[in-house]
Amino acid sequence: MEVSIISRKENPLLEREELIFLINHESQGTPSREEIRNKLAAILDVDTDKLFIKKIESEYGSTRSKGVARIYKSKERALLVEPHHIVKRNIGETVEGGKKPKEKKQAKPAKIKKIK
């Protein structure tokens, strides 16, 4: 698996760096999110807790994939900014202060009136 970074952009407002990367994975399927995170963290010399992969798209009929990743200044900042489902995909944790999907209320059973 070969990883190359296509673009890097600093986003000071959200205290993160946004990356677009390309993965060459000859003679194997698309690597897992965890493998890609570990490889990117090693290349960029950052902690994996601060690196979040937003998406990975495989090119049809090719052994290349393109992805988007974000590197935050701190894990706490990442948990505040990143959506809950992205955090869960990357580190598998539930977030206390982050964005959680609203819980659905269960519908009450309908009351049946008896006719005399």
Image (cartoon, rainbow, N blue to C red):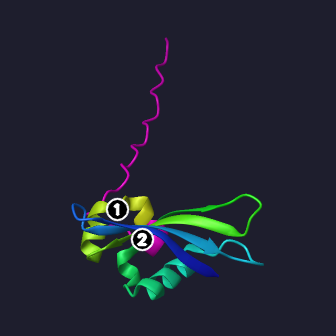
Rendered-image quadrant of the N terminus? bottom right
Name the main secondary structure of what is drawn in magenta: loop
Magenta stretch contains residue 97: yes
- Residue reaching furthest to the top: 116
Q: Where is residue 2? Give x, y as percent.
A: 62, 81
Name the residue carrying label 1: 82
Which residue is drawn at the image coordinates 47% and 86% (left, top)? 43
Label of residue 52 in the image: 2
Q: Residues within 10 Å of mark 2 (few under 14, many from 20)?
A: many
Q: In front here: 108 or 22?
A: 22
Residue 22 in the image: state x and y as whole percent. 57, 70
**Amino acid bearing label 1:** Glu
Left/right placement of residue 66 relative to residue 49 reads right
Residue drawn where x is 39% and y is 43% of the image:
105
Q: Quadrant of residue 86?
A: bottom left
109, 50: nearer the viewer: 50
Amino acid at dot 2: Phe
Q: Is residue 19 magenta?
A: no
Q: Which residues are magenta?
A: 88-116
